[in-house]
Image (spheres, rainbow, N blue to C red):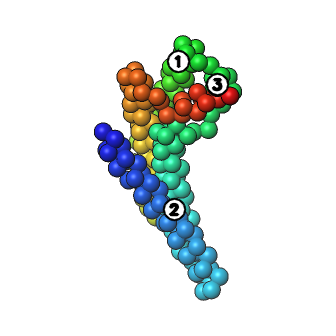
């Protein structure tokens, strides 16, 4: 199971690198064309915006899976034992609620975007909205896996930092 997780992590990192490369080529290429030849790519702005949406969604998913999201743990980092466990599960419940709304809202945007096209590249706007849908679905799966692993006695991602803070 760890090798599958490792392979998926490397796949997401590769997709992020491709998004970043595409953004750099589109924007820098457009700058060069405008500066030296007084022309440019019409699709540059739209393409870089689409790739940025996917880059952010992929990186947020990766950060969530590794427990590296920005969090406010001033109080919870000092908790140990049963109190820490209760707050960790309460946090998971709140995350699950937020993910539910993210997924349902993203799905509604994907449905609307099926009939709408981008002005320059003419791709369905559902492609951009699908970024948050994929992010929410992947985060929901990761949340379930993290919960399952904790029930089996494994340390959840990010919890090792909380234990260090409690000892300090």
In front: mark 2 or mark 1?
1
Residue 37 visible, this orientation: yes
In three-dimensional space, the C-alpha distance between marks 2 and 1, rounded to whole angstroms, equals 38 Å
Residue appearing at x 58%, y 73% in the figure? 28
Name the residue carrying label 1: 85
Q: Are marks 2 and 1 in contact (CB under 8 Å)?
A: no
Q: Position of residue 140 (x, y in %)?
A: 43, 32
Residue 123 percent across, percent down from the top left: 42, 58
At a point 64% along the width and 25% down the height, the residue shown is: 166
Residue at position x 30%, y 39% from top? Answer: 1
Q: How far apart are labels 3 and 2 at the CA level?
A: 38 Å
Identify the secondary structure beneath mark 3.
Answer: helix
Q: Mark 3 packing: few (<14 Cα in 10 Å), some, or many (20+)?
A: few
Label count reads: 3
Mark 2, Cα crowd under 10 Å, few <14 / some 14-19 / many 20+, is: some
Query: Is residue 78 left or right of 106 when viewed as pictured?
Result: right
Whether residue 118 can be seen here: no
Q: Please, which residue is most extreme toward the bottom here?
A: 37
Q: Which residue is mark 3?
A: 166
- 134 displayed left or right of 39: left
Using the image, tell me which numbered label, if any, was put on residue 20.
2
Q: Secondary structure at mark 2?
A: helix
**Closer to us: 115 or 19:** 19
Q: Earlier in the sequence, mark 2 or mark 1?
A: 2
Disc 1 on helix, strand or loop?
Answer: helix
Q: Quadrant of residue 13?
A: bottom left
């Amino acid at each position: 199971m760890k090798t599958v997780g490792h392979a998926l992590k490397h796949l997401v990192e590769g997709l992020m690198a491709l998004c970043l490369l595409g953004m750099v080529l589109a924007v820098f290429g457009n700058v060069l064309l405008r500066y030296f030849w007084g022309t440019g790519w019409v699709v540059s702005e739209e393409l870089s915006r689409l790739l940025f949406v996917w880059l952010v969604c992929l990186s947020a998913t990766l950060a969530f899976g590794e427990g590296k999201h920005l969090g406010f743990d001033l109080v919870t980092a000092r908790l140990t034992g049963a109190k820490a466990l209760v707050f960790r599960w309460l946090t998971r419940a709140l995350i699950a609620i937020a993910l539910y709304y993210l997924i349902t809202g993203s799905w509604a945007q994907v449905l609307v975007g099926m009939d709408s096209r981008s002005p320059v590249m003419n791709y369905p706007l559902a492609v951009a909205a699908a970024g948050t849908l994929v992010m929410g679905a992947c985060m929901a799966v990761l949340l379930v896996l993290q919960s399952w692993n904790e029930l089996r006695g494994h340390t959840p991602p990010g919890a090792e930092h909380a234990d260090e803070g409690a000892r300090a």
